[in-house]
């Protein structure tokens, strides 16, 4: 598999705090990459830098062969690089269908004047958006609640809806920020199965989380971040048996008891 996303030497400092410090890793086309680390390791800041939510102090990001460092999130989304956020970002009073429909506008919005005057092109794009929203809802098993208010869904299904909104933008690579935070074991399994469906559709996935059990059962490869820098990289088995990784998560005394 070829490198689809390359992160090279990214840094972002807040005063004297090095939130991300000379971070480099790659995401290969077609894989599920896990990016893990203990709380406060710099994971969310890293995904913010890659997705254009924040700008790096230094370093570069290359996506699908082109430099995209510092590009705005909506421009990256139109190129096929889409991310979700830790918190659910649904409109709770709107239906599930309406929430997914808004995700289609990143790639199918005709422009203000075309939409206002309801031109033939606007009508064509609206019909395509409706069809795509229906397809995504059916694909992720949300078609039975399509007309329910999004806020009425259990929290785990709101997380799935977050993914549905992102998938409606037709991404080539989707970055998921802590998709199972706050979920039960059953809800976590549902999200894992959903992510596998996404990959099986040919979409590359990067999952940012601190839940090692979830990541190890899902990902092809794992990058570990600690104190803003890359600590380790490899298969889940290699990473989880790395003494430095165990120490970063559990501390020296627990790492010794762990048998490393």
Image (cartoon, grey):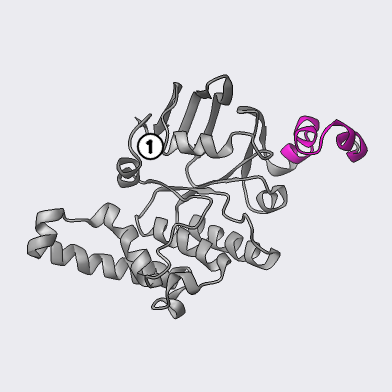
190 vs 77, left or right, is right
| In this view, 133 is above or below 256 | below
Q: Is the magenta stretch mostly helix, strand or loop?
A: helix
The answer to whether one can see residue 104 in this image is yes
Compared to residue 189, the image places residue 229 above or below, namely: above
Q: What stretch of residues is rendered in magenta?
A: 238-258
Residue drawn at x 48%, y 68% is 140
Please say if 201 is above or below 28. below
Q: Quadrant of the C terminus?
A: top right
Q: Name the residue under label 1.
A: 64
Give the percent coordinates (x, y) of residue 123. Answer: 14, 67
In the figure, is residue 226 to the left or right of 130? right
Toward the bottom, the furthest residue is 144
Say if 63 sits above or below 166 in the image.
Answer: above
Q: Which residue lies furthest to the front in this view?
A: 15
Residue at 77 percent across and 30 percent down: it is 244
Characterize the local packing of mark 1: few (<14), some (14-19) or many (20 or more) Cα atoms within 10 angstroms: some
Residue 93 point in image, percent of width and height: 39, 70
Q: Does the magenta stretch include residue 256?
A: yes
Res 68 quadrant in image: top left
Residue 260 visible in the displayed image? no
Q: Residue at x 45, y 52 (%)?
A: 203
């Amino acid at each position: 598999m070829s490198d689809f996303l390359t992160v090279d030497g990214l840094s972002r400092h807040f005063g004297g705090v090095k939130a991300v410090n000379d971070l480099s890793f790659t995401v290969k086309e077609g894989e599920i990459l896990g990016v893990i680390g203990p709380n406060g390791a710099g994971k969310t800041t890293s995904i913010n830098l890659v997705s254009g939510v924040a700008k790096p102090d230094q370093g570069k990001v290359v996506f699908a062969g082109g430099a995209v460092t510092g590009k705005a999130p909506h421009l990256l989304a139109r190129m096929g690089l889409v991310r979700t956020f830790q918190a659910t970002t649904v409109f709770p009073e709107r239906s599930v269908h309406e929430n997914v429909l808004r995700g289609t506008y990143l790639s199918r919005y005709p422009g203000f004047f075309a939409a206002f005057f309801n031109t033939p092109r606007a009508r064509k794009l609206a019909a395509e958006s409706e069809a795509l929203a229906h397809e995504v809802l059916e694909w992720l098993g949300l078609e039975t609640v399509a007309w329910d208010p999004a806020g009425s869904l259990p929290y785990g299904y709101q997380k799935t809806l977050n993914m549905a909104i992102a998938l409606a933008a037709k991404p080539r690579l989707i970055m998921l920020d802590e998709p199972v935070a706050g979920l039960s074991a059953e809800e976590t399994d549902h999200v894992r199965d959903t992510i596998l469906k996404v990959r099986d559709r040919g979409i590359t996935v990067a999952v940012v989380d601190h839940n090692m059990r979830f990541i190890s059962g899902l990902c092809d490869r794992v990058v570990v971040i600690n104190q803003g820098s890359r600590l380790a990289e490899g298969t889940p088995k290699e990473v989880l048996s790395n003494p430095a990784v165990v120490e970063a998560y559990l501390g020296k005394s627990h790492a010794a008891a762990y048998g490393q």
